[in-house]
Amino acid sequence: MRAARYLLLIVTLSLMVVLIAVSQARVGMALPPSEPPDNQTLSPFWPPQIARWGDYIVRSSAPRGLDPDLVAAIIRAESRGIPDAISPAGATGLMQIMPAEMGFPWRPTMRTLLNPAINVDWGAAILASTLEDGQGDLFASLAAYNGGWGNVNDPDVQAYALWVANLYAMAVAARNGYRPEDALQWGMVVEVRGREDVRFARNVAPGRLLTTDIVGPRITPGQSVISAVPYNSRANDQRPWRILVWLLAGNHSE
């Protein structure tokens, strides 16, 4: 009898363990999904001369919180995907990095920067640093990547920033199933979340098909078509913040 009671107790406890496990599994399944991860693939928008560097782009973008399509847009604008491109000023490689020989002794040599993997990694690091310095002003940060902060109002540098913004918008449109050319008829709104010290600028490229308006934190524009996160700050000792881009139907230029 005692053995039978022990056996019954063991069976009962086993059933309770199973029921608890099933209940926990159901609770876990019922939890809302976590926030989707940052985009870690290249858009189908990019031609072969850019897409061929996709592995390097994603590998360098991910740890820095960059959308790889933004890095791809820089590469398209800077070098058209030519790994051994060197500008008259000495800017080198896919992301046209100024090397040690050109007055930047903390950077690799020109020869080293001709290595595509090294070049993209340095370019992604510089872009992330520039976006941090820009405090959320995406357009100004793109201009600064090309011409430095002292030249962000130069017409040629602003044209470059607009070109990169258009390329990025078309890539975002394509990866969301829209025709890339449609993005050129939409407005772009940039939203900063997680920062209270942002200096906002509006209409930095007035009169263009694609304009960049900086709006306040936590303001979601109405009638948005699609959105993307070009930069998700991962600074070690700072509160995380992010830049969001909203592509809106219609022409929003003034």
Image: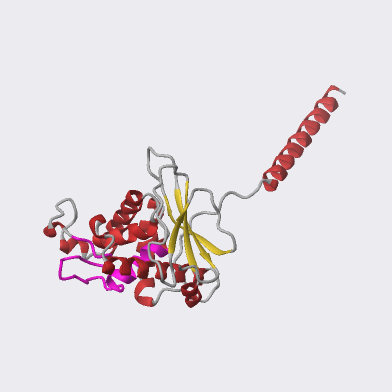
Q: Which segment did they paint magenta?
A: 69-98
Between 134 and 45, the one nearer to me in the picture: 134
Question: Which image quarter holds the N terminus?
Answer: top right
Between 185 and 170, the one nearer to me in the picture: 185
**Residue 205, percent across and down?**
38, 65
- Residue 118 lies left or right of residue 250; in this view the side is left
**Residue 70, percent across and down?**
39, 63
Q: Which residue is located at x 12 percent, y 56 percent?
A: 103
The furthest residue to the top:
2
Is residue 94 located in the magenta-colored stretch of the structure?
yes
Q: Which residue is located at x 18 percent, y 70 percent?
A: 87
The furthest residue to the front:
254
Q: Is residue 218 above or below residue 114?
A: above
- For residue 201, which quarter of the picture? bottom left
**Residue 137, percent across and down?**
38, 55
Q: Which residue is located at x 48 percent, y 60 percent?
A: 189
Prevailing secondary structure of the magenta residues: loop
Which color scheme does this rendered protein use?
A: secondary structure
Q: Which residue is located at x 27 percent, y 73 percent?
A: 82
The furthest residue to the right:
1
- Residue 23 lies left or right of residue 98; in this view the side is right
Question: Which image quarter holds the C terminus?
Answer: bottom left
How many numbered tags mark residues here? 0
**Residue 23, percent across and down?**
74, 40
- For residue 89, which quarter of the picture? bottom left
Is residue 232 located in the magenta-colored stretch of the structure?
no
Between 96 and 15, the one nearer to me in the picture: 96
